[in-house]
Image (cartoon, rainbow, N blue to C red):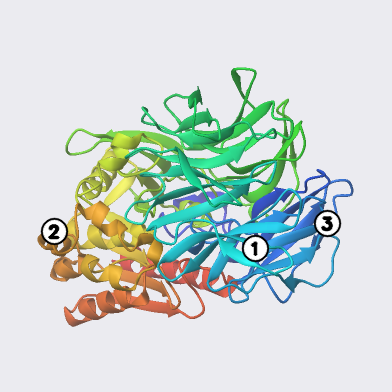
Amino acid sequence: MSTRDDHWSREPGRWEATLQPEAWATIPTIATPRPSPDGRKIAYSRGYDGRLDIWVLDLDTGQTMQLTDVARPQGPDLSQRQASSIAWTPDSGTIVFASNQEGKLWAVPASGGPSRQIDEAAGNHHSPSVSPDGTRVAYVAERGEAVDIFVAAINGSWVRVLSDLESDDYVAEPKWSPDGRSIVWMQWPHYDMPWDEAAVVVADVETGERRIVAGGERVINNWPQWSPNGESIFYMSDNGSQHPGLWAVHPDGSEPEPLVTGMHDHLWPAVSPDGTAIAFTRNDYNENQVCVFARGETRQLTDERGVHTELAWIDERRLVCVYQSPLAPPDLWEITVDGERRQLTFSATGGVVGGDLVEPEVISWQSRDGLTVHGMLFQPREIQPGKHPLVVHIHGGPVGQANKTWIPWIQYLVQRGYVVLAPNYRGSKGYGRSFMEALYGDWGGGDLDDNVTGVEAVIARGAVDPTRVVATGGSAGGYSTLICMTRAPEVFKAGIARYGIANLATFTDRTWIFERHYIAKLMGGTGGARGDLYRERSPLTHVDNVRGPLLILQGEDDIVCHRSEMDTMAAALEHAGKHVEYTVYPDEGHGWKHVSTIIDDARRSDDFLVRMVLNR
């Protein structure tokens, strides 16, 4: 039997972890809370081992029930953009959802019973919104390159297009006006993303007449919400600011007015049923806290270290949201206007509850060009100076953010004795538009400098062994991992890349419509105009530079980063005589959903680090 002193005297990286992959792999994924109009129930999605279902929670009794069976909901999933999958009918009796059955809309009784398909129009359908009288449903329909708002009778008797078939814009999140005469949605050009430029559009349901009520070049206007009386639309906009704030505008586009602004990103607006308050989240120091704007003043309701998202009002005094933190997986929480909190779902397993988890430290450093870069540093509770391997955990996007969410793999690494840095390199959200746009035209350049200087800053603290620095990440983070290994091999001694990009010139050939044109934004032009830069910033070009070993993990069915990218990279590394280990997981896409895959990833990655980093 080893003692505590024996445990801590062993080499960092080989410590026994309290948190085990089997504990976090079996946690269900809780998301998409949707309160019923009568405030008595909450529908939500629950994902487990590759299956996603709609569950309903009775707020009076606390009982939960799975509603879906044969037809199951789409999303929440990276491949669903900003899509939602659940909508209530006004009488609180039925839930309409976007299903996995050929992408059509289905309905299921909220008290239980068989599901039924309610539309047959062409394409993949999502983001349903039921009209106030309960007779119609608006939704997003994707048909190849065309993405439009459709309106259909809820009994499936007719369907028509409401948005512009000639438009090349992407549309999302339709919502009915209280009188049922209009629908508001957000839209943005295909060559952009909703965090670059987006407009709020209102359309007359009968005539089809459309008008942009909030727009502007390089201005984001998103997440529109109707006031209960239909006289205002509330939305988030960065008009004239570095950060999105809360705005209001009349449905005819008149009198736009900023309500809440400041040096933070404001997100997830939700209007109370009586229209007297608007809830939203504020991004601050890698946390998202819930605030309420009422009677001209803003009050912060939460202060827990973590991230609150997907706000929705239950009634005039209660909100529901998804809350997660480095110490707790996502669950539904109830928050009152007085700041009282109550946990509604409990997804953590016993192995997580007793997992001895750590909070990160928010740090900053100077990059090569003097830009201030921020990140989160996770460290073991006890430090052996100069002995700890460093893992740089690079977020995806690349326009994303490392914040205080539930990432059990990081906690596991820390318990094993690693120091983990989660950098928010240039291009990350949360630090203003200028910081985000500093990446554009230079992906794989300045952001690499940000990650390298982050490593240097952590090494200077004295805990890390500079000969044992590892890069890891998925999606855009997988691309960054490969860039670290090919263009900074003197810094990064090993890499674990999940579903990344090898060749920027070919990536757009087989990726999904949502990001097909976005590489041009990140690279400052198309491959034809900027071909030299595309080649220079493609990891495939610099395979010969690789010095350390690489583990590459890929989903067979990934529609975002097609497996051909990692097939090509692995083959090129092998041909160049480099050490590469490549695994493709069947029935997985852009991220893992099966328990067995999550466990295999963790075990395989841990074994790779022991063999290729600690044993060398």
Residue 561 falls in image quadrant: bottom left
Q: Nearer the viewer, residue 360 or 567?
A: 567
Q: Is residue 435 above or below residue 82?
A: above
Determine which residue is flagged by label 1.
152
Observer able to see residue 480: no
Residue type for callout 2: Arg
Q: Residue furthest top?
A: 296
Spatial separation of the CA atoms under disc 1 and disc 3: 19 Å
Identity of the residue drawn at 43% across and 78% down:
556
Helix, strand or loop at mark 3: loop
Identity of the residue drawn at 37% across and 46% down:
421
Determine which residue is flagged by label 3.
93
Spatial separation of the CA atoms under disc 3 and disc 2: 55 Å
Residue type for callout 3: Gly
Where is residue 50? Give x, y as percent. 60, 72
Whether the residues at callouts 1 and 3 have beta carbons within 8 Å, the answer is no
Sequence-earlier tag: 3 or 2: 3
Callout 2 environment at 10 Å: few (<14), some (14 to 19), or many (20+)? some
Where is residue 350? Give x, y as percent. 70, 56
Sequence-earlier tag: 1 or 3: 3
Is residue 397 found left or right of 81 in the rendered image?
A: left
Helix, strand or loop at mark 1: strand
Determine which residue is flagged by label 2.
530
